[in-house]
Amino acid sequence: MQDLETSIRERAYQIWIDSGRQDGHADAHWLAAQREILSVSLSAIGRTEVCDGRTGPTKVRSSRKKKRAA
């Protein structure tokens, strides 16, 4: 996997291109790219499979509790 900073830099550049190459918005482009890259990275961590040693890999369940219909 690419270095995190490199991924953010490349995405920020793409956002700059997509926004018409307007100067003066580098910070906004960087923050948008950072938010997007970190969000994707954290989502990938949540979908990681874990092997408990007894059976095959199992999916990690979300720690959020679902509300039941009354």
Image (cartoon, rainbow, N blue to C red):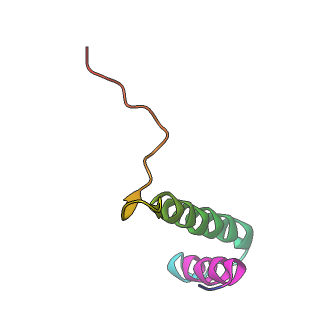
The picture places residue 11, in percent across and down from the top left corner, at: 58, 79
Q: How many labels does the image show?
A: 0
Is residue 28 covered in magenta? no
- Which residue is situated farthest in the left direction here? 70
Q: What stretch is highlighted in magenta?
A: 3-16
The picture places residue 30, in percent across and down from the top left corner, at: 68, 71
Residue 69's place in the image compared with 14, above or below, is above
- Which residue is situated farthest in the front direction here? 54
Q: Say left or right for 38 vs 66.
A: right
Q: Say left or right for 55 vs 6.
A: left
- Give the residue displayed 49% in from the left and 40% down from the top: 63
Is residue 6 covered in magenta? yes
Q: Say left or right for 63 vs 26.
A: left
**Quadrant position of residue 26:** bottom right
The quadrant in which the C terminus is found is top left
Q: Say left or right for 40 vs 21.
A: left
Instruction: Give the camera-side residue of 56 and 54.
Output: 54
Secondary structure that dominates the magenta span:
helix
The quadrant in which the N terminus is found is bottom right
- Give the residue displayed 61% in from the left and 64% down from the top: 38
The picture places residue 36, in percent across and down from the top left corner, at: 56, 65
Instruction: Give the camera-side residue of 53 and 12.
Output: 53
The picture places residue 62, in percent across and down from the top left corner, at: 45, 45
Instruction: Give the camera-side residue of 55 and 14.
Output: 55
- Give the residue displayed 63% in from the left and 77% down from the top: 12
